Amino acid sequence: MNEAKFRPGERVRVLKAYPPGHIRTPHYIRGCVGEVERICGAFPNPEELAQMRSGLPAQPLYRVRFLQKNVWPDYAGPATDVLEIEIYQHWLEPA
Amino acid sequence: MGGEPGSTVVPDEHDYAEWERRIDAMAVLLWGLKGTKKYFSVDEHRKAIESLPPEVYDSIAYYEKWILALAQCMVGRGVVSSAELAQKMKDVMFKRQHHDMGGLPAGKVEPSEHDYAEWERRVDALSVLLGSKKILTVDERRRAIESLPPEAYDQMSYYERWTSALAQTLIQRGVITTEELARKMHERS
Amino acid sequence: MSDEQGKYRPLSYFQLMEISLRELLVEKGILTNEQVDAEVENMRSRTPERGAKVVAHAWVDPAYRKRLLENGTKACEELGLDVPALKLVAVENTPQTHNAIVCTLCSCYPRMLLGIPPDWYKSRNYRSRMVREPRKVLDEMGLKLSPGVQIRVHDSTADMRYLVLPMRPAGTEGWSEERLASLVSRDCMIGVAVPKGPAD
């Protein structure tokens, strides 16, 4: 498996990229900055599995926490509201 | 689209740009037509163009369709991965795929439920069984759903989409052929 | 062709496709009808009561609750629940925090524990709006939260599946686990509702 690059608590940015294929990083979160909540483990890359390939080596998967106000410019709720999403390592860079 | 109404043919032409000529050249090379290794066929390339959602198909130019389809074929065949392309193409936005709907405006959530029909439960059962026998993956089935034209995606029910995805994936995997399915559906109808 | 209720109704294109796919798979020796029937029965046996059992046990046993929050899958297996391939993350409601689950990209849901998700969970409206205006959606669905409560929305985008561990209602001291479990609906475990106790 690929080595885990990020640790819980670390600030990360989601790549602002829009490649073709089966992608599990939602459009709305690309380019956003959040904090690693936990490392979920490493799993075969779904983008590759969707193309009938093995998806190996397994890729680290993180739960990343974002403040809603940093995701939606017009977010109407309290500043403490958060959105937590699972994102694969290759979609993250240090923030 | 043969036979459908359309407006007057506008006889425009343009001088081919270098990037457009390069697309033609890359396609020919990747199709294996110049004694080069064949990575995918002309038919796969055409199928990728045909699978573009209608509003994308109608709003982008000829060579934009070709390069988009080329990228999809290359990802499909493992010539490049989505991840590699993402790294190369950072910071240039493209529209969301139709199923990727988080954050879009929408109406009130109707608290609807329905009793699952036997055929719907069987679709779930088939999907689980085929997955556990490693004949296909949920990821392939999801991708098949995501490839549905937006209108179809919106109008089909949940289990209709999953049935369609099961068929597409089984055909893609070569477990069944289009012909076998057509024949069986005809026999049983 | 008759459907399960014995009424004659023409088969839809997709019902026909399901039958055809299944028959082809059986003819090719890939599956048997017995396997399909057995899996349908397996799936029928997975109901939200299984999740309610986990929640009730966590309410009465603080050490179990801690284990549940650390490793949801192992905690289910501890109670004898068969949850193949499930990677469960339990998220806990507190007086300061409310959790809610959505899958914006499709319909990911802890099926191996709770069974089939409701139609509304898979709907365009829920999937689109829940990440962006959760308070409004919850309010429309009958759950009003004060601005002092933080909302954590979990978008189930990859391999994990989520179970909301609601707060135990007041006035339930000394109740049996079975009685406590009866307060925990499927909607509480998705996070669009909270259990109602005797005082509510």
Image (cartoon, grey):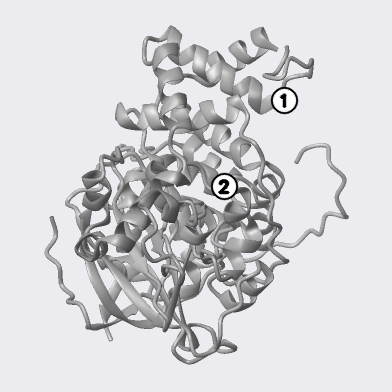
Q: Looking at this rendering, what residue extends furthest in the front direction?
A: C174
Percent coordinates x, y for residue C69 in the rendering: 26, 64
Comparing marks 1 and 2, which lies closer to the viewer?
1
Q: Give the side of residue B90 with respect to residue B97, left or right.
A: left
* Figure quadrant of residue C134: bottom right
Q: Amino acid at mark 1?
A: Ser
Q: Nearer the viewer, residue B16 or A61?
A: A61
Where, quadrant-wise, is the C terminus of chain C in this rendering? bottom right
Query: As displayed, is residue C96 above or below residue B163?
Result: below
Q: To which residue does mark 1 refer?
A: C12
Mark 1 Cα-neighbour bin, 10 Å: few <14, some 14–19, many ≥20: few
Q: Nearer the viewer, residue A44 or C98?
A: C98
Count of picture labels: 2
Q: Give the side of residue B26 with respect to residue C121, left or right.
A: left
Residue B134 seen in the current view: yes
Percent coordinates x, y for residue C31 in the rendering: 39, 15
Q: Give the side of residue C15 with respect to residue C166, left or right.
A: right
* Figure quadrant of residue C61: bottom left
Q: Amino acid at mark 2?
A: Ile
Contact (CB < 8 A) between labels 1 and 2? no
- Give the alpha-carbon distance from disc 1 to disc 2, as whole Å: 29 Å
Q: To which residue does mark 2 refer?
A: B49
Query: As displayed, is residue B47 above or below residue B120?
Result: below
Query: As displayed, is residue B171 above or below residue B35?
Result: above
Q: Which mark is residue B12?
A: none
Q: Nearer the viewer, residue C35 or A49?
A: C35
Chain ID, mark 1: C
Chain ID, mark 2: B
Q: Residue at x 42, y 51 (%)?
A: C52
Q: Residue at x 26, y 45 (%)?
A: C79
Q: Secondary structure at mark 1?
A: loop
